[in-house]
Amino acid sequence: MSSKRVRVPPRWFVRLAWHTHRGMYRITRGKIGLWRPKPGRWGTLRLTTIGRRSGEERSVILGYFEDGQNLVTMAMNGWSSGEPAWWLNLQARPEARVTVSGGGFPVRGRAAQGEDRSRLWARWQEIDKDLDQYAALRSTETAVVILEPITEPG
């Protein structure tokens, strides 16, 4: 574990980066902005949930890695306190849609629990050596979110 003190960019910068990334994805119609994970590196996916209050589609781009058929991300809100809106939406309505480089499919989201959470957190630690220091900046535990593909009945 790293002993250095981690620093998160100012909130305005994090939000600007999010908007820029989503804008690039939208302008290029998905040609730029999503990539598959590689060994020791995370990829990016687009998650579309249904707003818990609005009932409208809401999309975000998130980092992830693959765990078998499942995709794993974290509800970290840019390492700020509070839960990200997409995670609150997913808790209210677990069915969502994921788009990855190469296509999209329906998923069901849930928080990893117990040994599963520990195992998946350890995988994130392999990707980000400062994970624990970043997580310590939040006032609540960071959910490890499993996105399970929903298979259409036969």
Image (tube, rainbow, N blue to C red):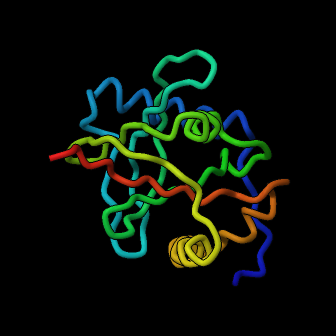
Task: Specify the farthest residue to the left.
Answer: 154
Task: Decide: is 5 above or below 77.
Answer: below
Could you tell me residue 53's position as x and y percent?
Answer: 63, 19
Residue 91 image-quadrant placement: top right
Marks counted in the figure total 0
Foreground of the two, 12 or 93: 93
Task: Decide: is 118 above or below 20.
Answer: below
Q: Is residue 121 left or right of residue 4?
A: left
Which residue is found at the position 66% from the left and 39% from the top? 84
Which residue is found at the position 40% from the left and 50% from the top? 44
Could you tell me residue 85's position as x and y percent?
Answer: 64, 34
Q: Is residue 85 left or right of residue 93?
A: right
Could you tell me residue 89's position as x and y percent?
Answer: 59, 33
Which residue is found at the position 60% from the left and 32% from the top? 16
Which residue is found at the position 73% from the left and 62% from the top? 135
Task: Decide: is 119 above or below 82.
Answer: below
Task: Specify the farthest residue to the right.
Answer: 139
Q: Is residue 9 visible?
A: yes
Q: Is residue 52 left or right of residue 41?
A: right
Task: Specify the farthest residue to the bottom.
Answer: 1
Foreground of the two, 114 or 144: 114
Foreground of the two, 89 or 153: 153
Could you tell me residue 68's position as x and y percent?
Answer: 33, 69
Q: Is residue 31 left or right of residue 95?
A: left
Q: Quadrant of the N terminus?
A: bottom right
Q: Is residue 17 visible?
A: no
